[in-house]
Image (tube, rainbow, N blue to C red):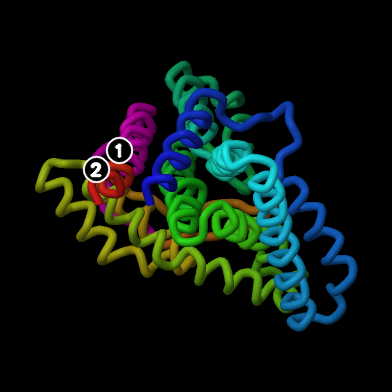
Amino acid sequence: MRVHIVILAGGLLLDLVFADPASLPHPVKFIGKSIAWGEKQWYKKGRKGGIYLITFTLLLTGGSVFLIIFLLDKINPMVGFFARVIFFYLGISFKGLLKESEKIEKHLSKNEIDKAQNSIRSLVSRDTKRMDKEDLIRGTVESLAENTSDGVIAPLLFFLLGGVVGMWIYKAINTLDSMVGYQNKKYSEFGRYPARLDDVANFIPARITGLLISLSFFNPSRILSAFSTMWRYAKNHPSVNAGYPEAAIAGGLGIRLGGINFYRGRKEFRPYLGNSRRTLTPEVIREARIRCSLAVMLLLFLLTIL
């Protein structure tokens, strides 16, 4: 466990200093290419093809990471150790999330709506040109909460369970869901099991994230508001998991999330999460970013003392 904590700390430090290495080939891109190849092979088989794709992707990802680590350990244990740190660093997406949210906040503070709409494209799959100022703030806060779970807490927990191999198996599951897990006509059959697998993988991390976000408010009344909002509203969300961190941050901040979104020209209403007690201003994004950061720090603190 001590070695795990050192690897975790080293990987997080690299992420906070360098963020995502945009100029370098990222393992997620290779996972994406393998999924795209598998989709061409098995799409016509429907649900059975989805199972084939899951099996292929997880074996390829987990096997590749295991083989690389195994060979580097044979060369030198220290080389293997540093490889684990690099794999952990590449599997965490925290600094990039914070930077994007900060960029959107700054644009909105200057009423640069067009620039904010362009920036939020990296965080949401909505029709960003239809988003007004309040939609942009709401979307950013929702993405901060959900991606703190999917991009930080979940891979971290899978790392503790299965090392970097376990972490990258989770990343493969997450990538499968993002590519073929859409519940639309095209993927209603083929993407059914990849989507369900992602739901299972994120079931516990999402609820832990919601609890950590609630505790990040420190003030007892705000903790109670965050927790009670999560308990009451989380199940209203279309996702079985995303509602927990989103409802928690809505309750703690005293805002209401959810509402009308547009996806590829299609209007969709998301059930409301929380009660609106304050106006949505760019400062809300800053506070959400602080609370998500504190949630991660709380988890690290708990792991360290344990």
The three-letter amino acid code for the residue at tag 1 is Leu
Where disc 2 sits, the SS reads loop
The verdict on residue 96 being magenta is no
Element type where label 1 sits in the image: helix
* Location of residue 45 with respect to 69 vertically, above or below: below
Residue 254 at least partly seen = no
Residue at figure coordinates x 55%, y 59% from the top left: 166
Q: Is residue 96 above or below residue 171?
A: above
Q: Up-down: is 19 above or below 257?
A: above
Q: Is residue 77 left or right of residue 25?
A: left
Q: Which residue in the structure is indicated by mark 1?
A: 294
Please state the horizontal and vertical placement of residue 251, each as a whole percent of the image: 25, 50
Which residue is most to the right? 41
Q: 92 or 114: nearer the eye?
A: 92
Q: Position of residue 215 (x, y in %)?
A: 21, 48
Identify which residue is drawn at 76% across, 69% down.
56
* Residue 257 vs residue 38, the one in the foreground: 38
Start and end of the magenta stretch?
272-297
Splitting the image into 4 quarters, where does residue 157 fall?
bottom left
Q: In front: 3, or 270?
A: 3
**Image coordinates for residue 200, horizontal then vertical, percent:** 50, 71
| Labels 2 and 1 touching (C-beta < 8 A) | yes
Q: CA distance from mark 2 to mark 1?
A: 6 Å
Name the dominant secondary structure of the magenta segment. Answer: helix
Circle 2: residue type: Ser
Q: Is residue 34 left or right of residue 275?
A: right
Query: Which mark, by number, is residue 216?
Result: 2
- Residue 43 appears anywhere in the view: yes
